Amino acid sequence: MPGRRRCIAALSLAVLLAGGVFAPAVRAAALAQLRTFLAETRAARGEFTQKVMRVDGSVAESGSGDFAFARPGRFRWEVRKPFEQLLVADGQRLWFYDRDLNQATVRPMSDSLVSTPAAILFGDADLERDFALRELAPRDGLEWVEALPRSKEAGFERITLGMRDGLPVTMQVADAFGRTTVFGFQAIVRNGAPAPELFRYVPPKGVDVVEQ
């Protein structure tokens, strides 16, 4: 159903339009873990799940896939289920490709990452310039950080990030309509050398390209 796919695509793009792993910590405070994460991880790969939750707590949409990033400004977010969709940032441009719709959208990177959830995982911006950060009480075996965007045009209300042993385990993004998108991260390997082609995108022949 194209409309449903477009909904998932728009949520993925809006939610992400913001890594890695560091040495195990002994119940280190969440904010300290996050700062170390940003400072010490230059590249990483891993897997993710995502769920869009309705106001009543039921799951509206779900998906899974894998990701990779290399600072500065390069990342790949590939949804494999239920529909194949791809976000690729090459440092200058951000591409979004939907295989079933046979369409690729491209926009400048400068318009895409500041004050976004993607900035927390993949960006190089001054996090505390763009977000008001505070620690929350531990729960579910995780240490938690809340990030509130300083920009009134961020498109979401808050992010809560759950950390364990220096790893991001879950990220919850709440929007102004009462919906929450929940990301889970697994099998993260940091500071390797991701293949450069992961961060390149060339539209296949016949794909409709839309510039924004």
Image (cartoon, helix red, strand yellow):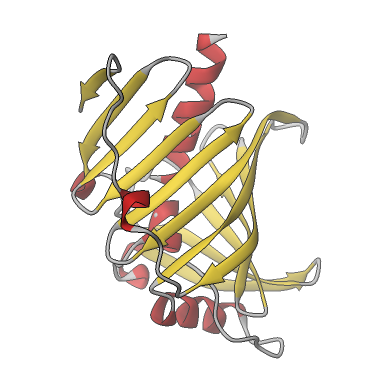
State the residue in front, 4 or 90: 90
Q: Residue at x 77, y 36 (%)?
A: 57
State the residue in front, 179 or 99: 99
The percent coordinates of residue 85 (x first, y second) are 48, 31
Q: Is residue 47 above or below residue 2?
A: below
Quarter of the image with the C terminus is top left
Residue placed farthest to the bottom in the image?
A: 26
Does residue 14 appear left or right of residue 172 in this picture?
left
The percent coordinates of residue 78 (x first, y second) are 49, 41
State the residue in front, 199 or 129: 199
Q: Residue at x 22, y 47 (%)?
A: 109
Does residue 14 appear left or right of residue 212 in this picture?
right
Quarter of the image with the N terminus is top right
Q: Is residue 122 above or below residue 178?
A: below
Question: Can the viewer see residue 40 in this picture?
Answer: yes
Question: Can the viewer see residue 115 in this picture?
Answer: no
The percent coordinates of residue 117 (x first, y second) are 45, 53
Total labels: the figure holds: 0
Q: Residue at x 67, y 80 (%)?
A: 165
Q: Residue at x 59, y 43 (%)?
A: 65
The percent coordinates of residue 26 (x first, y second) are 70, 90
Does residue 161 appear left or right of residue 198 in this picture?
right
Q: Is residue 8 above or below residue 45?
A: above
State the residue in front, 109 or 43: 43
